[in-house]
Image (cartoon, coloured by chain):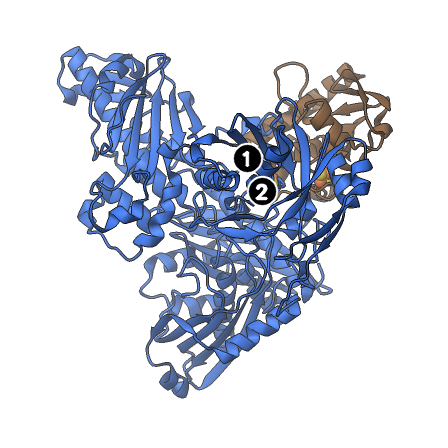
Chain colours: A blue, B brown
Amino acid sequence: MGKWTRRAFLTTGVIAGGGLIVGVAMRPGNQAGELSDLLGDDGGQLVHAYVRIDSDNTITAMVPHSEMGQGAQTALAQMLAEELDADWNDMRIEEAPAIGAYSHYSLGRKYLLKGINFPDFIVPSVDGAMMKLMDNLGLQVTGGSMSIRMTGSLGMRVAGASTRQMLRKAAASAWQVPLKDITTDNSHLVHTPSSRREPYASFVNEVAKMTPSQTPEFKKAEDYKIVGKFVPRLDIPSKVDGSAQFALDIRRPGMLYATVIRAPVFGATIVSIDDQAARKIEGVADVIELPPAQSNMMIGGFQSSPAVAVIADSYWTAKKGRETLNITWSDVDLAARSSTDIFAQFAKDITASEERQSDRLQGDTPTQFLNASKVIEADYTVPFLAHTCMEPLNATAEISNGQCEIWVGCQNPLGFRKAVAEALSVDEEKVTLHNQLMGGGFGRKSRPDYAIQAAQIAKAVGRPIQLIWSREEDIRQDFYRPAIQSRFKGGIDENGKLLVWENTYVNKAEPTEAPLIPYAVEAQDIGHVSSPTHVPFGAWRSVDHSQHGFFTESFIDEAANATGKDALKFRLDLLKDKPRHLAVLKRAAEEANWETPLAKGRGKGISLQESFGSIVAQVVEVSIVDKSVSVDRVVAVIDPGLAIAPDGMKAQIESGIIYGLSAAMYGEITIQDGAVVESNFHDYRSLRMSDAPTIETHIINSGHELGGGGEPGTPGIAPALANAVYAASGIRVRSLPLMKAFSS
Amino acid sequence: MVTSFSVNGKEKTVQVDPQKPLLWVLREQLDLTGTKFGCGIAQCGACTVHIDGQAIRSCVTPIASVAGKAVTTIEGLKPESDEQHPLQQAWIEHQVPQCGYCQSGQLMSAAALLSENPNPNDADIDQAMKGNICRCGMYGRIREAIKAVAGSSVAEQFYDAMETNHG
Ligand code: FES
Ligand code: FES
């Protein structure tokens, strides 16, 4: 692969077989000054996108993002293909390997760069783009709906456009014609006056000698042929015949299977293990104790208790062995041992409001409360939630001659590799990570605990092993979506105007703007207190938006109800200076026939939520018969700026809605005596075909900056549902899941 | 214990604990990894295969109970030829899979439904498919894809052909 100069942002090179590779490395041009400390000692290459043109004219996009199912890789390839004017039928996608040159992990450093602003004029350049990238990055690496927004707009497009520009130059000089007469079409160069036409592959040797432009000219949106159009996802055919390979499908010669159990009470350690019965089971090879797993990565850092692993010739045998173990765990001294204690603690801490930190303080709240003719107050709670990815956590590890190979589906390959290296006390170069398709990620697969365990076991037994978590372990050893309580107080004047909004909640995480409201309420005091629990927590699809979307969009509805105004009209009146929000909300109302009343026992509810750069409105229709709630229809409208893959975006919204609806209807992780009660899909329920509403998604391409699609569907469903239930029944649900108030 | 049965038309003999579930025999011994593990307690449907044409949850089916029977997995859903099962085509057309992990099970449940009831209504579809969880929430697309195949002439021809082939 060609020579990478330390400073080059784009580089070219010839690969074996005579193909061309063009790479875009986004990193700061200036490594001096205050940025240098933040970039770590790896030289700070930040994100890479690659394009490869092979001698048969196939074009491969090498994508530095994992595929969780969201279709991000296809969308990224679309962006590259568009600027490159590639023939979509000859496009391929590969995930970039987890090696330092793809240094995706370094993206996490954006947290340190927060608050640094860069003038707009440098943004079109690649280094400006990098700054912007750092600035906008979401919480996780593949996550925060950022792959398309950032890598796509700032990496893939540059790689594509720059390569196309070089190809045109190469053809002009080979054919001795003016550059302006050279156009491109479906991976071919065309000399317009003579209609001479040759594939890109004919020019790759020339291009390899050129220096790519960092600021190539991009196509105009109206000329797009691939972006914004329907293209079939490239990964789908393998997902209908069983041939798609997930981490669980990896097979290594001589491989054994393992399963684990970690202390049910988070933080407990092992006092003793009685494994006599397990060892008697035919096929059980070993029972071992695993040291605590931890990682202090900036993204996904954690510490977890020691575990016991059973290794056998089959997962089923290992699981049987696990069931016979008799382990004594240490006592953990806990202030709040159960969900009831935890929520009591939240309420107490909100009431005390010691060391309350402000998220937004504007206007004069005390005076506005005096001006108000009506004051409304409400407390909301949401429980802990597990992720339950369809594919249970698993990883395969093999260690020989001091080298560790690991096969895992994860959202942060380089972070995982680093964490495994640390756990094994070896250099990162000794660990090779093969990232696999993920059977769901949702934030859970950004924590490397399971990969570390696999490596620990492989090291201990000296053979390749595949570690498979049982579903029970998956539900009981998650990094949960945090439970939160949020307290509101609003003041309304006699004309029904919302004058003041006061909100205090516990345990803030990310994104920081999640509890903020888009509405023009003059006086606002939004803040949080800390009320830690012993329950491990982490990112869960849409992160804090999933809780605050429910809180704020329910309370705004309560305010509307208190004035007797229509919930839609009430919101529209408070969004006069927010044209995008207005457009989304109005469109949703229109598509859902908001004005048309429903029969008795049925109701409509609406919500509006901006997250990850996209604005989403949802209208939900429910029917309530004999205290049983059925969700009949959801209309969703999203303004993501521009939908690169419109059908993929719709699928993501459908997916986000069902994920959020499962949680809103049924989702609850209960803590009792310090441990999780639920264990599998029978008591941690997921929505099924028979309870799923029809979902209609509409996209508004407003032309604004690209927003995400993987997460923005989730936050708005719970409030729209609760608001619909109120409209149908007069019952205001302030605590999720809904099935606690209703049957279903 | 030795157990013999057929998988996708081929005779197989395995030597295993008679209680070992079919799922793990398929995945670990016969290298058929298209059938997935999701819960292990017949709650999610990821492990759905056909035994003598019926959709069953292989994670709770002891291998001993399969002796002498005909198992079809996702790898054997399409006929010998290169052709796809009409449901597989519909799945691609409707861009059903997201992560794809549940889809082997979804397709096997849907195929069993259509072979018994070529023209299911919504309630029939709910009934046949409610054992299959999709955490990516692609229920709407799954339903549309099933409906696209249901009652279509291509499906009828396909099932006629299947019957002629498999007797
Ligand atoms: S794995 Fe068999 S039903 Fe879930
Ligand atoms: S497609 Fe991911 S679980 Fe169904």
Q: Quadrant of ligand 2?
A: top right
Compared with A78, A516 (above or below) is below
Q: Position of residue B157 (x, y in %)?
A: 69, 20
Compared with A300, B79 (above or below) is above
A151 or A629: which is nearer to us?
Answer: A151
Task: Indicate the amino acid at tag 1.
Answer: Val
* Residue A5 visible in the displayed image: yes
Compared with A55, B70 (above or below) is below
A2 or A80: which is nearer to us?
Answer: A2
**According to the image, label 2 marks what residue?**
A450
Q: Quadrant of the N terminus of chain A?
A: top left
Measuring 55% from the left and 35% from the top, which residue is drawn there? A408
Question: Badge 1 sits on which subunit?
Answer: A
Q: Residues within 10 Å of mark 2 (few under 14, many from 20)?
A: many
Tags 2 and 1 in contact by the CB under 8 Å rule?
Answer: yes
Measuring 60% from the left and 46% from the top, which residue is drawn there? A291
A66 or A623: which is nearer to us?
Answer: A66
**According to the image, label 1 marks what residue?**
A408
SS for dot 2: helix
SS for dot 1: strand
Task: Indicate the amino acid at tag 2.
Answer: Tyr
Question: Badge 2 sits on which subunit?
Answer: A
Q: Residues within 10 Å of mark 1 (few under 14, many from 20)?
A: many
Q: Which mark is residue A329?
A: none
Q: Position of residue A290 (x, y in %)?
A: 63, 44
Instruction: From the viewer's perspective, tell me whether residue A446 is left or right of residue B146.
Output: left
